[in-house]
Image: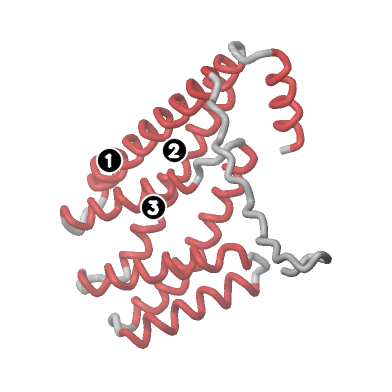
Amino acid sequence: MPASDGRTRTPKLARFSLPSRPSQADVRAAIADSFMLAVACLISYWLTTRVLSLVYSVSKADDALGGMWSVIATVFLFRDSYNKSLSAAVSRMAATLVSFALCLIYLAFLPFHPWGLAILIGLSVLVTGLIGRPEDEITAGITTAVVLVVASLSPHEAWRQPVLRLADTAIGVAVGLVAAWLGLRAVRPAIDQHRPNRQLRGITHHDKDE
């Protein structure tokens, strides 16, 4: 843009600052969180593919899909505080229950059809919004899409798919909540002992705000 003296000024670019080097305590916390999540995902997958499959199993492929769905639920709960993990658990279960009800009613009477897929995804978003949880609309739509597409791959007794995916999600959410609680009660306090007092006070105040 022209200046008062007639010269043209070029706009200054915003400075890009590299993130500061993490402290040793931050590195330990990140490693601990990663390890906790990895173990939680392993447990979720094992419970779904080895234990739940003993109760009912459609096929090996369906068991693996259930394990993946359970792991996704566990990862979905991975947050930086227990309250946020608990809120994520409520969100995940609310969306899954909406999808469960709609898909179960549909698959009990009708086979998979692309039009049915589109209509049920729309209904999942609509119902989730009407019950006052618009933030869960996307999750409900995704869950409905997965359930119906899997039902098209296993058309025999397809109505069982919503039940199985609900069980998978419940296992993943339960494991995720236990992992979040252990991280808050056991892992974090041990790591915080190595933080500088000034930084620790800041974290304490932040946790209280959460």
Give the residue pinned by disc 1.
51
Q: What element carries label 3?
A: helix
Residue lying at the far right in this picture: please name it.
4
Q: Distance from label 2 to label 1 (Cα)?
A: 14 Å
Q: Which residue is drawn at 64% across and 51% down?
A: 14
Name the amino acid, label 3: Ala
Instruction: From this view, report whether residue 77 is shown above or below residue 38.
Output: below
Q: Where is residue 68 in the image (x, y as percent from the top left)?
A: 31, 50
Q: How crowded is mark 3: few (under 14 residues within 10 Å), some or many (20 or more)?
A: some
Instruction: From this view, report whether residue 8 is shown above or below residue 172.
Output: below
Q: Given contact means CB atoms under 8 Å apart, are the residues at marks 1 and 3 in contact?
A: no
Name the amino acid, label 1: Val
Of discs 3 and 2, which sits in the foreground? 2
Front in this rendered view, residue 138 or 178: 138
- Total marks in image: 3
Instruction: From this view, report whether residue 202 is shown above or below residue 198.
Output: below
Q: Is mark 1 on a helix, strand or loop?
A: helix
Give the residue pinned by disc 2.
175
Sequence-wise, the earlier of marks 1 and 3 is 1
Sequence-wise, the earlier of marks 2 and 1 is 1
Q: How crowded is mark 1: few (under 14 residues within 10 Å), some or many (20 or more)?
A: few
Q: Distance from label 1 to label 3 (Cα)?
A: 12 Å
Name the amino acid, label 2: Val
**Quadrant of image for the C terminus:** top right
Q: Position of residue 4 (x, y in %)?
A: 83, 66
Q: Quadrant of residue 37?
A: top left
Q: Residue at x 76, y 28 (%)?
A: 205
Give the residue pinned by disc 3.
167
Q: Which residue is drawn at 58% across and 52% down?
A: 90
**Quadrant of image for the N terminus:** bottom right
Front in this rendered view, residue 86 or 108: 86
